[in-house]
Amino acid sequence: MNPFHLFRGAAPADTWFPVGRLSSFPEVGEDDEDLVHPRDCSATAKPGCKVFNVPKEDLSKRTEVLITPDGLGLVDEEGQALQDQVLIFKHRGKMHAIDHKCPHSSFPLSRGIPFDIEDFGVVLSAGITCPKHSWSFDLFTGNADRGGYKLPIWEVELRDVKASDPGSDEPHDKEVWVRRKEKKRIG
Protein backbone atom coordinates (compact mmCIF):
# COMPACT_ATOMS: atom_id res chain seq x y z
CA MET A 1 0.00 0.00 0.00
CA ASN A 2 1.33 3.43 -0.95
CA PRO A 3 1.13 5.69 2.16
CA PHE A 4 1.02 8.80 -0.04
CA HIS A 5 -2.33 7.79 -1.53
CA LEU A 6 -4.64 8.21 1.44
CA PHE A 7 -7.80 7.53 -0.54
CA ARG A 8 -8.61 5.52 -3.60
CA GLY A 9 -9.23 7.27 -6.88
CA ALA A 10 -12.22 6.73 -9.13
CA ALA A 11 -13.99 3.44 -8.62
CA PRO A 12 -13.86 0.82 -11.35
CA ALA A 13 -17.07 0.33 -13.34
CA ASP A 14 -17.68 -3.12 -11.81
CA THR A 15 -18.44 -1.63 -8.38
CA TRP A 16 -21.95 -0.71 -9.56
CA PHE A 17 -24.66 -3.34 -9.10
CA PRO A 18 -28.40 -3.49 -9.92
CA VAL A 19 -30.99 -3.47 -7.13
CA GLY A 20 -34.22 -3.66 -9.13
CA ARG A 21 -36.50 -1.78 -11.46
CA LEU A 22 -37.55 1.74 -10.51
CA SER A 23 -41.18 0.59 -10.64
CA SER A 24 -40.45 -1.99 -7.89
CA PHE A 25 -39.83 0.78 -5.33
CA PRO A 26 -42.97 2.32 -3.79
CA GLU A 27 -42.99 6.04 -3.05
CA VAL A 28 -42.34 6.80 0.63
CA GLY A 29 -42.73 10.02 2.57
CA GLU A 30 -46.42 10.67 1.97
CA ASP A 31 -47.22 9.04 5.31
CA ASP A 32 -45.61 8.89 8.74
CA GLU A 33 -44.71 5.20 8.51
CA ASP A 34 -41.22 3.71 8.69
CA LEU A 35 -39.56 2.39 5.54
CA VAL A 36 -40.37 -1.29 6.16
CA HIS A 37 -44.11 -0.55 6.29
CA PRO A 38 -45.81 -2.15 3.22
CA ARG A 39 -47.07 0.29 0.58
CA ASP A 40 -48.94 -0.11 -2.70
CA CYS A 41 -46.58 -0.67 -5.61
CA SER A 42 -47.57 -2.12 -8.98
CA ALA A 43 -50.87 -3.51 -7.59
CA THR A 44 -49.18 -5.28 -4.65
CA ALA A 45 -48.09 -4.23 -1.18
CA LYS A 46 -44.31 -4.10 -0.76
CA PRO A 47 -41.96 -2.78 1.92
CA GLY A 48 -40.98 0.82 1.21
CA CYS A 49 -37.31 -0.13 0.87
CA LYS A 50 -34.84 -2.81 -0.11
CA VAL A 51 -31.77 -3.84 1.86
CA PHE A 52 -28.69 -5.59 0.46
CA ASN A 53 -25.73 -7.07 2.28
CA VAL A 54 -22.69 -5.95 0.23
CA PRO A 55 -19.34 -7.30 1.48
CA LYS A 56 -16.57 -4.77 0.82
CA GLU A 57 -14.16 -7.53 -0.17
CA ASP A 58 -16.32 -9.23 -2.82
CA LEU A 59 -19.34 -7.53 -4.43
CA SER A 60 -20.27 -10.75 -6.21
CA LYS A 61 -21.36 -12.13 -2.81
CA ARG A 62 -24.02 -9.44 -2.33
CA THR A 63 -27.44 -10.69 -1.25
CA GLU A 64 -30.82 -9.10 -0.79
CA VAL A 65 -31.91 -9.14 2.84
CA LEU A 66 -35.40 -10.42 3.66
CA ILE A 67 -37.61 -7.72 5.15
CA THR A 68 -40.51 -9.03 7.19
CA PRO A 69 -43.64 -6.91 7.82
CA ASP A 70 -42.54 -6.30 11.42
CA GLY A 71 -39.09 -5.21 10.23
CA LEU A 72 -37.35 -7.79 12.37
CA GLY A 73 -36.13 -10.01 9.51
CA LEU A 74 -33.32 -7.66 8.60
CA VAL A 75 -30.64 -10.33 8.59
CA ASP A 76 -29.36 -11.94 5.40
CA GLU A 77 -29.04 -15.70 4.78
CA GLU A 78 -25.61 -15.81 6.40
CA GLY A 79 -26.76 -13.98 9.53
CA GLN A 80 -25.06 -10.67 8.84
CA ALA A 81 -26.81 -8.00 10.87
CA LEU A 82 -26.43 -4.44 9.51
CA GLN A 83 -22.72 -4.83 8.73
CA ASP A 84 -22.01 -3.78 5.13
CA GLN A 85 -25.69 -3.26 4.34
CA VAL A 86 -27.15 -0.66 2.00
CA LEU A 87 -30.70 0.66 2.35
CA ILE A 88 -32.41 1.76 -0.89
CA PHE A 89 -35.72 3.63 -1.18
CA LYS A 90 -37.62 6.24 -3.20
CA HIS A 91 -38.60 9.45 -1.39
CA ARG A 92 -40.53 12.17 -3.23
CA GLY A 93 -39.57 10.70 -6.62
CA LYS A 94 -35.80 10.53 -5.92
CA MET A 95 -33.89 7.32 -5.26
CA HIS A 96 -31.68 7.22 -2.16
CA ALA A 97 -29.10 4.66 -1.05
CA ILE A 98 -27.53 4.95 2.40
CA ASP A 99 -25.79 2.72 4.92
CA HIS A 100 -28.44 0.70 6.72
CA LYS A 101 -26.78 1.18 10.12
CA CYS A 102 -27.24 4.45 12.01
CA PRO A 103 -23.71 5.81 12.59
CA HIS A 104 -24.73 7.03 16.05
CA SER A 105 -26.60 4.06 17.52
CA SER A 106 -26.06 1.11 15.10
CA PHE A 107 -29.85 0.85 14.72
CA PRO A 108 -31.42 -0.21 11.38
CA LEU A 109 -32.44 2.94 9.48
CA SER A 110 -35.11 0.92 7.65
CA ARG A 111 -37.11 1.53 10.83
CA GLY A 112 -36.61 5.27 10.27
CA ILE A 113 -38.98 7.79 8.75
CA PRO A 114 -37.93 9.96 5.81
CA PHE A 115 -38.92 13.63 5.85
CA ASP A 116 -38.42 16.93 4.04
CA ILE A 117 -35.94 19.44 5.46
CA GLU A 118 -37.72 22.78 5.19
CA ASP A 119 -37.14 26.40 6.03
CA PHE A 120 -40.23 28.64 6.06
CA GLY A 121 -42.10 26.17 3.86
CA VAL A 122 -39.33 25.85 1.26
CA VAL A 123 -38.01 22.30 0.84
CA LEU A 124 -34.21 22.46 1.04
CA SER A 125 -33.31 18.78 1.29
CA ALA A 126 -34.53 15.44 2.63
CA GLY A 127 -33.62 13.51 5.75
CA ILE A 128 -34.23 10.35 7.70
CA THR A 129 -34.82 10.06 11.45
CA CYS A 130 -33.42 7.12 13.39
CA PRO A 131 -36.18 6.07 15.83
CA LYS A 132 -33.79 4.84 18.52
CA HIS A 133 -32.63 8.30 19.69
CA SER A 134 -34.45 10.58 17.19
CA TRP A 135 -31.25 11.70 15.48
CA SER A 136 -31.71 12.83 11.87
CA PHE A 137 -29.41 12.65 8.87
CA ASP A 138 -29.47 14.58 5.58
CA LEU A 139 -30.00 12.13 2.69
CA PHE A 140 -27.78 14.13 0.32
CA THR A 141 -24.81 15.04 2.55
CA GLY A 142 -25.08 12.45 5.33
CA ASN A 143 -24.66 15.18 7.97
CA ALA A 144 -26.32 14.58 11.34
CA ASP A 145 -28.53 17.18 13.01
CA ARG A 146 -26.20 17.04 16.04
CA GLY A 147 -22.78 15.72 16.92
CA GLY A 148 -20.05 14.95 14.41
CA TYR A 149 -21.67 11.83 12.98
CA LYS A 150 -21.97 11.35 9.22
CA LEU A 151 -24.15 8.78 7.49
CA PRO A 152 -22.39 7.16 4.50
CA ILE A 153 -24.29 7.94 1.29
CA TRP A 154 -24.16 5.58 -1.71
CA GLU A 155 -24.29 6.70 -5.34
CA VAL A 156 -27.45 5.92 -7.31
CA GLU A 157 -27.76 5.73 -11.07
CA LEU A 158 -30.86 5.06 -13.18
CA ARG A 159 -30.14 3.12 -16.37
CA ASP A 160 -32.39 2.45 -19.33
CA VAL A 161 -33.88 -1.01 -19.60
CA LYS A 162 -34.01 -2.61 -23.02
CA ALA A 163 -37.62 -3.04 -24.09
CA SER A 164 -38.71 -6.67 -24.38
CA ASP A 165 -40.77 -5.76 -27.45
CA PRO A 166 -39.65 -2.58 -29.30
CA GLY A 167 -43.16 -1.93 -30.66
CA SER A 168 -45.03 -2.42 -27.39
CA ASP A 169 -46.94 0.23 -25.46
CA GLU A 170 -45.63 -0.93 -22.08
CA PRO A 171 -44.35 1.94 -19.93
CA HIS A 172 -40.64 2.70 -20.07
CA ASP A 173 -38.88 1.60 -16.89
CA LYS A 174 -35.41 2.19 -15.50
CA GLU A 175 -33.04 -0.10 -13.63
CA VAL A 176 -31.67 1.22 -10.32
CA TRP A 177 -27.91 0.71 -9.82
CA VAL A 178 -25.92 1.62 -6.69
CA ARG A 179 -22.31 1.70 -5.49
CA ARG A 180 -20.41 2.89 -2.46
CA LYS A 181 -19.51 6.54 -2.79
CA GLU A 182 -15.79 6.71 -3.27
CA LYS A 183 -13.75 9.06 -1.16
CA LYS A 184 -12.14 11.88 -3.07
CA ARG A 185 -8.41 11.92 -3.44
CA ILE A 186 -6.55 14.59 -1.49
CA GLY A 187 -4.06 16.67 -3.43
Image (cartoon, helix red, strand yellow):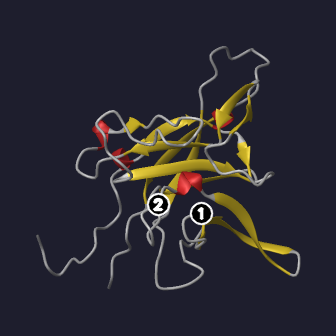
Q: Nearer the viewer, residue 135 or 15?
A: 135
What is the quadrant of residue 11 in the picture? bottom left
Q: Relative to residue 160, is residue 11 depicted above or below?
A: below
Q: Secondary structure at mark 2?
A: loop
Specify few, some or many for label 2: CA neighbours under 10 Å numbering under 14, 14-19, or 20 or more: some
Residue at image point 61% right, 44% down: 36
Q: Relative to residue 75, is residue 6 depicted above or below?
A: below
For the C terminus, the image quarter is bottom left
Whether residue 87 sits left or right of residue 158 in the image: it is: left
Q: Nearer the viewer, residue 40 or 24?
A: 40
CB under 8 Å between callouts 1 and 2? yes
Specify few, some or many for label 1: CA neighbours under 10 Å numbering under 14, 14-19, or 20 or more: some
Q: Is residue 20 visible to the viewer in this orientation of the structure?
A: yes
Amino acid type shown at disc 1 = Pro
Q: Secondary structure at mark 1?
A: loop
Residue at image point 47% right, 64% down: 102
Residue at image point 30% right, 43% down: 59
Residue at image point 34% right, 39% down: 62
Q: Nearer the viewer, residue 38 or 19?
A: 38
What x and y, as percent, mark residue 48?
Answer: 65, 42
Amino acid type shown at disc 2 = Phe
For the N terminus, the image quarter is bottom left
Q: Which mark is residue 107?
A: 2
Q: Nearer the viewer, residue 150 or 176?
A: 150
What is the quadrant of residue 115 in the picture? bottom right
What x and y, as percent, mark residue 125?
Answer: 71, 70
Disc 1 to disc 2, how far (Cα)?
8 Å
Label located before the other in sequence (1 or 2)? 2
Q: Which mark is residue 131?
A: 1
